[in-house]
């Protein structure tokens, strides 16, 4: 039986954009595990199987339910050890820091640039919920948040300097081929590119090669 | 024969502070390899054995010379595989990103706060060289660089959020025990604490526990 994932969807059922769900999609592609997805919206908390943390992704594998992209990655590596996401315990531990680098440093900068685009793509049933929770968090209307986008994008690109330096020494974050640490960063870029036309990277950024080759490997 | 390292020294021969040399010192302590050090100053380029990149650390192991803290770590793990610094190839690849996170994000912020303190601790023969090269890089007198220290320290502490989140889930960056990725970050804190009384962390910062326990493990 294929794995099944509750996957955040936008106005259209087929519009999927969550950076956390992208991680799981890429992890399954990495392991060549078939994955089916169910569209889900922010306000459909009651539809999620338990246990969950109130948001997607939630993975169902037979009678097993696993919530949270990190827990899902750890579960997949234990349950389906071929094509590991983590080469050893230390690599898994390092990936946690890289995951938090994305979540605490990179993604908050990106969110401030594209949050209004996220809202525009939501299903009507989610729009009021998203606006209220995010405007409370940021203390201003969604429309006003990206006002300093040209300034933020400089900060964002600077924050990627450690990654550029790494990728000038080796092909992927995980070494000779991409794995979950790469997917954590790529999930953010896929999310942003899906919801917004705003270019987070300059066209000639060295990261473009890494991003494209990682995705081609998963698709092949 | 013990390993020998050219180690950046200050006014006093025994005053050692380079964050890169700290990494090597910790890597050797991790592997229980005796390490002797030779005091060296910035302006003594001609004293370094070859090959070198014009700065410390340079490691001598019998007739082998290895320069650069990252190359030294990789060399030590290959030559002395017990108590590995990297649990697997993927863990080594991840460590490179973490090393560059320190060098491209954290350390530049820290340097701008303590650069004048660094200069105060240098040997007289290095003071003019350091002032000229760094004032050229920063475009202002050393004394003027830390003017916005109270502002920078907030940025610096925010930039550590990924590490705090990681250490709330696991004891060390490398998992159950510290290793080279931890030492890359700790080298920066040792460097700063050695040259400057300025407190980079708040006294109750959760990172203090990690820092202290990592150092106690190496000393025991």
Image (cartoon, coloured by chain):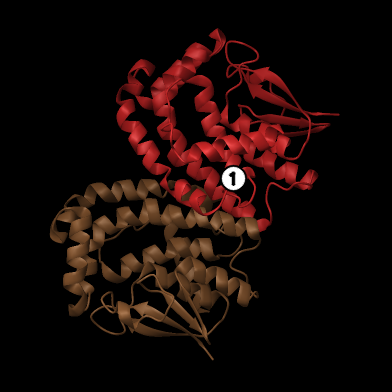
Chain colours: A red, B brown
**Image coordinates for residue B218, horizontal then vertical, percent:** 51, 75
Residue placed at 76% from the left, 30% from the top?
Answer: A60
**Image coordinates for residue B46, horizontal then vertical, percent:** 31, 80
Query: In the figure, is residue B46 to the left or right of B50?
Result: left
**Disc 1 packing (10 Å; few <14; some 14–19; many ≥20):** many
Query: In the figure, is residue A79 to the left or right of A135?
Result: right
- The answer to whether residue B104 is above or below residue B87 is above
Residue placed at 33% from the left, 73% from the top?
Answer: B17
- The answer to whether residue A31 is above or below residue B138 is above
Q: For the image shown, how many numbered marks are present on the structure?
A: 1
- The answer to whether residue A201 is above or below residue B67 is above
Residue B48 visible? The answer is yes
Query: In the figure, is residue B195 to the left or right of A67?
Result: left
Residue A67 visible? The answer is no
B130 or A129: nearer the viewer? B130
Residue placed at 42% from the left, 56% from the top?
Answer: B102
- Give residue B84's quadrant in the image: bottom right
Quadrant in which the N terminus of chain A is drawn: top right
Please state the chain letter of the residue tagged with numbered disc 1 in the rendered image.
Answer: A
Which residue is label 1 attached to? A181
Quadrant in which the C terminus of chain A is drawn: top right
- The answer to whether residue B202 is above or below residue A35 is below
Describe the element under mark 1 as helix, strand or loop.
helix
**Image coordinates for residue B112, horizontal then vertical, percent:** 25, 55
Query: In the figure, is residue A208 to the left or right of A84?
Result: left
The single residue placed furthest to the bottom in the displayed view is B1
**Image coordinates for residue B85, horizontal then vertical, percent:** 58, 67
The single residue placed furthest to the top in the displayed view is A124
The single residue placed furthest to the right in the displayed view is A1
B112 or B186: nearer the viewer? B112
């Amino acid at each position: 039986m294929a794995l099944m994932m509750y996957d955040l969807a936008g106005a259209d059922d087929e519009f999927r954009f969550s950076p956390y769900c992208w991680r799981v999609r890429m992890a399954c592609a990495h392991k060549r595990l078939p994955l089916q997805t169910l569209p889900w919206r922010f306000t459909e908390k009651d539809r999620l199987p338990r246990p969950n943390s109130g948001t997607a992704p939630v993975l169902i594998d037979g009678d097993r339910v696993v919530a949270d992209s990190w827990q899902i990655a750890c579960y997949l590596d234990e349950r389906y050890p071929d094509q590991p996401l983590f080469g050893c315990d230390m690599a898994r531990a390092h990936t946690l820091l890289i995951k938090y680098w994305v979540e605490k440093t990179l993604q908050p900068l990106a969110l401030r640039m594209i949050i209004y685009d996220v809202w525009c793509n939501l299903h009507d049933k989610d729009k009021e919920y998203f606006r209220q929770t995010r405007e409370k968090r940021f203390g201003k209307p969604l429309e006003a948040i990206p006002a300093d986008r040209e300034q933020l994008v400089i900060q964002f690109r600077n924050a990627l300097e450690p990654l550029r330096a790494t990728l000038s020494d080796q092909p992927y974050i995980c070494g000779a081929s991409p794995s979950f640490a790469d997917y954590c960063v790529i999930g953010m870029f896929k999310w942003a590119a899906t919801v917004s036309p705003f270019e987070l990277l300059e066209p000639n950024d060295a990261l473009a090669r890494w991003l494209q080759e990682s995705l081609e490997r998963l698709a092949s």
